[in-house]
Image (cartoon, rainbow, N blue to C red):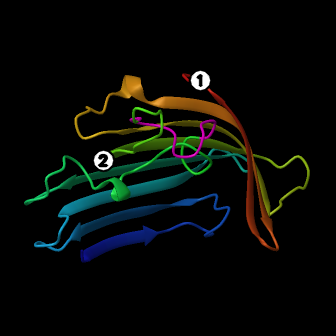
Amino acid sequence: NYELSLGWRRDSRNRAILADSGSVSSLSVSSSVPGSDLEYYKINTQFPKYFALSENITLSTELNLGYGDSYGDTEIDGLPPHMNYYAGGSRSVRGYDSNSLGPEGSTGDPLGGNKRVVGNLELILPNIFVEQSQSTRIAAFFDAGNVFGPNETVEWDNLRTSAGLAFMWLAPIGTLRFSYAVPLND
């Protein structure tokens, strides 16, 4: 299989890591070349935005959507299994095991799906440990999302939600994230 990809990205954040103003808009499309053994396409969009509520408090929002499907002579509905979307875990819906949301196989293992909807809200709070720190962040968050299979309709009632607290530290070895989350609709 050969794959072609096209992407567009606009970044107006004040910092790439631990930003507190601006936004990022991105759209990517990838597709296998017609005539490949597996013919499929994927469309992804991501939109994080930061709103200053006061001098020390920022609201961060992020929406992450993905859709994919097969086309041509491919005999499967949706995406090939290795191209499926997954959700759950520290980078999507915190409070759930990594890649655990969405359709499950007969053994209870996650199968992934061809549709992904994930939204995150974070209230970035003043750091009580270090004033005006550019290397640490404390936030209260609310996450919602799920993955849906090819024969499933995206329904807002089926989104899994969680809430909690997060701490980020821009350490000398890289960004470290610590979250405590509680699933709200297990």
Q: Is residue 71 magenta?
A: no
Q: Is residue 102 magenta?
A: yes
Residue type, label 2? Asn
Q: Residue drawn 27% across and 68% down?
A: 30
Q: Residue drawn 54% across and 42% down?
A: 88
The rendered magenta stretch, by its main secondary structure, is classed as loop
Residue 101: % across, % down: 48, 37
The residue lying furthest to the left in this view is: 73
Q: Residue drawn 19% across and 46% down?
A: 77
Residue interval drawn in magenta: 94-104
CA neighbours of label 2 inside 10 A, class few (<14), some (14 to 19), many (20+): many
Closer to us: 147 or 23: 147
What residue sits right under mark 2 in the picture? Answer: 114
Closer to us: 36 or 125: 36
What residue sits right under mark 1 in the picture? Answer: 184
Q: Quadrant of residue 139?
A: top right
State how many labels appear: 2
User: Is the residue 69 above or below the residue 109 in the image?
Assistant: below
Q: Residue drawn 8% across and 59% down?
A: 73
Residue type, label 1? Leu
The C terminus - image quarter:
top right
Residue 123: % across, % down: 66, 41
CA neighbours of label 1 inside 10 A, class few (<14), some (14 to 19), many (20+): few
Q: For numbered disc 2, what is the local secondary structure?
A: loop
